[in-house]
Amino acid sequence: MVMRFRELIEQHYRDHPPLGFYARKLGVTTARLNSCCRVTTGRSSLALINDRLLTEAKRSLLYSDMTVNEIGVALGYDDAAYFNRFFSRRVGLPPGRFRDTPYLGTAEVDRVHWIKLEL
């Protein structure tokens, strides 16, 4: 089930559907989905969704010429301030500063990318 959940995340993470959307697609309750994710990955279902958004944000910041606002919009954030808060709370730096110090995230983004490919 978690593998299918990850596939759904990949298809829909930019749309920000609620957790219930994923649970319905999988034919389970949100509690069951969360439980399976925690047992299998050690992370909550919401954390897995946020991890995917964060990985894509980091990748875009490091490897594209898009502005921070353009990256936020591409990831489904209508409000640049909300994207900045989302990123800053999880990384500890605002997106622009993260981009200016790419050595902070390059290895992590590459590692997450390879883990995803191995799944």
Image: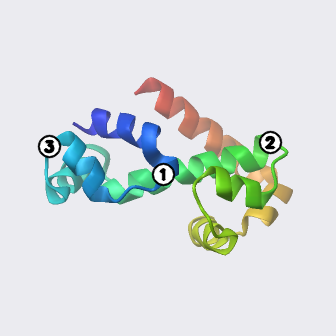
Viewed as shown, does residue 84 lie left or right of 47? right
Mark found first going from the N terminus, 1 or 3: 1
Please state which of residues 35 and 104 is positioned toward the viewer in this rendering. 35
Callout in the foreground (1, 2): 1
Outermost front residue: 78
Q: In terms of secondary structure, where does tag 1 sit?
A: helix
Q: Please, what is the three-letter code of the amino acid marked with disc 1? A: Asp
Residue 6: horizontal and vertical position, in percent? 37, 38
Residue 40: quadrant of the picture: top left
Mark found first going from the N terminus, 1 or 2: 1
Q: CA distance from mark 1 to mark 2?
A: 21 Å
**Image quarter of the C terminus:** top left
Residue 115: horizontal and vertical position, in percent? 49, 33
Q: Is residue 95 above or below residue 22?
A: below
Disc 3 packing (10 Å; few <14; some 14–19; many ≥20)? few
Q: Please, what is the three-letter code of the amino acid marked with disc 2? A: Ser
Q: Is residue 44 visible?
A: no
Tell me the residue that label 2 is attached to: 64
Tell me the residue that label 1 is attached to: 15
Q: Residue at x 68, y 44 (%)?
A: 59
Tell me the residue that label 3 is attached to: 27
